[in-house]
Image (spheres, coloured by chain):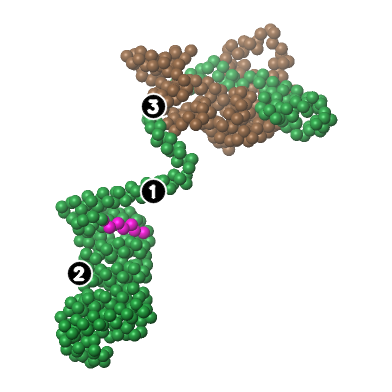
Amino acid sequence: MPLPRLAFALADESGQSSSSNAALASGTTLNHLEERALVQEAQAGNRLAFEELVRRYDRDVLRLALNLMKRTEDARDVYQEAFLKVYRNLHRFRFECSFYTWLYRIVTNVCLDHLRRRQARPEDQAPELHPAHYEEGTTDFFERQKEQRPSADPERHLMGQEIQKRLASAMERLSPRERVVFEMKHYQGLKLRAIGDALGTSEETVKNSLFRATRKLRSQLGELR
Amino acid sequence: MNPADWQNHCPEIAPLLVFYACGEADEKETALIEQHLSVCAACRSQLAEEKQFQALLISQPQDADLLDATGILLSQCRSELAENLDDMVRPPVLEKTPVFSAFRRWMALRPVWSGAALVFVGILAGAQATQWYAARQNASPLDLAVDVRPGPHISEDQLSKMAVAGINFMPATGAGTQNVRVQLNAEQPMELTGSMANPDVKRVVMYMVKNGDRFDPGMRLDCLDALKEAAKDSEVQDALLAAARKDPNPAVRLKALEALRDSTSDDAVREALLDTLKRDTNPGVRVEAVNLLVSSLEKSDAMREATAEYGLPAASRDNVASTSVGGDAQETSLASVVRELELLQHHDPSRYVRLRSAAALRQLSARGDQ
């Protein structure tokens, strides 16, 4: 529901009811703008247009950050850093590629920076995620209810836990670029060419990264299949 | 290619199966893979494993689902971003000049042409700005020197460093008192503007003329143009004499002599002209020295007296020498000139100098007969 989200954003920004009607009207209009027009509005200094752009893409950006960083604090940092960079550099965007590609170029660079920094500090490695750990109270209540249904297969459940544990461990062994490529291909569903554009590299290089990542993960998970 | 041949392509096809399984093989690869799979059970099995593996990956719950299942984190991130944006200074707004941005893009894609265009524009702008500035300076009722920065006086140290860094010298054009703008690119850039009445401008210009080996000959010629107006000044005269004697470039030496045209009655100048006659390696410079000496002697009262008394040019070199003994300074000078001219007339390697010297002696004789 874009309209309420935008209205909420306006209230956050101004905090004044006198201007919110006009702003809401413009926000409603913005919601229907084509992406190009929206970017142009944001480049002209329209904060609402920028926030609308953020809302169009930030869910995917946060997913990517969470999957890659595996820690909410790190993902939160990536989100802030990436969108603030976009905001600061928006005037440099010249429509030579799609806004989405340009945005992802920034996001992936921020992710790679964080992953490389983390790799350089072994004590700062992300903790492995164990589904059991979530079931002890840190995950959503509704998520836990699904697994407690009578139809749930305990053996399959245990196998799933083991696979997930090994997958997380195997992912940690991938290079930052391999992780980003694998994540963007299999979990974000991007084409290799788009991933190459986002990473500022060739499709061939991305193919090589995906191939290596797949091989490493398969060897790690081989015996469970 | 028959089916048996396709069976031998496993090493080429196997690595492509990863991409085929996720829809990333191109048309050519897809055709090859499908041909091969139709005959190779091993690769069909490998493809099935690849697909199974990818399905397994996708079926696993993602960290994002586990870490932000309710979307609270996303809301928090949005709120934080809004606060950060509030705290930030507004970013620069995009220039709304599509023509200019297109031009920038054009320049970025054609660096060589862009460089040439920029140099051309720079030259044009520089020429126009110089003329405009000169006109503005000339229009000023007071011909005051404007020392833009840094201090009122240039030190010797600055002068020596200036020579290392290079100097741009631009004499003003147009009517009125000539103004000079000197741009120094020494350690501390500075700009001096004014006429030769400005001590700093005069010092810099004289320094350039005296130290010919450190500056461009074209600049030195411009300096001489500027100094010509103040040739009566003893310091300027010294600088001109130094250039006439020592400058490595004959055109500069010639111009220095020309600048001294109105000072040829001065002993030091005559001495320098005689020195040029004896030592200068360039025939054109020697001829100019001859011309200047003759014109100076023509103006001299001593010349008339000497020619009346000794009957030049019939007088021989010995006669001239004998008359000079016990005479005044001008007579001595005349005798020296005649002696040098006679030497040149007979011994100068340049035919033109020999002819010109002979003509000069005739000229002096004719003046003396009157």
* Residue in the foreground of this view, choosing between B9 and B229: B229
Chain B's colour is: green
Q: Quadrant of the C terminus of chain B?
A: bottom left
Q: Residue tagged by mark 3?
A: A44
Question: Residue sitting at 60 percent across and 13 percent down?
Answer: A143
Asked if marks 3 and 1 fall on the same chain, the answer is no
Who is closer to the viewer here, A45 or A58? A45
Please state the horizontal and vertical placement of residue B287, each as a whole percent of the image: 31, 75
Instruction: Look at the picture and state if A39 lies above or below B314.
Output: above
Say if mark 3 contacts mark 1, CB within 8 Å: no
Residue on which disc 1 sits? B120
Q: Can residue B171 be found in the magenta stretch?
A: yes
Q: Are marks 2 and 3 in contact (CB under 8 Å)?
A: no
- SS class of the residue under badge 1? helix
Tell me where residue B33 appears, x and y as whole percent: 74, 28
Q: In the rendered view of the protein, which quadrant contains the N terminus of chain B?
A: top right
Amino acid at the residue labelled 1: Phe
Q: What is the span of residues highlighted in magenta in the rendered image?
A: B166-172
Identify the residue shown where x is 23% and y is 80%.
B363
How crowded pointer 1 is (Cα within 10 Å; few <14, some 14-19, many 20+) is rated as few
Observer-side mark, 2 or 3, equals: 2
Across and down, in percent, residue B183 comes to: 31, 55
Amino acid carrying mark 3 in the image: Ala
Q: Is residue A69 above or below residue B347?
A: above
Q: In the rendered image, which residue does mark 2 sit on?
A: B232
- What kind of element bears circle 3? loop
* Prevailing secondary structure class for the magenta stretch in the rendered image: strand
Q: Which chain is brown?
A: A
- Image quadrant where residue A195 sits: top right
Q: Residue at x 36, y 62 (%)?
A: B216
Q: CA distance from mark 2 to mark 3?
A: 66 Å
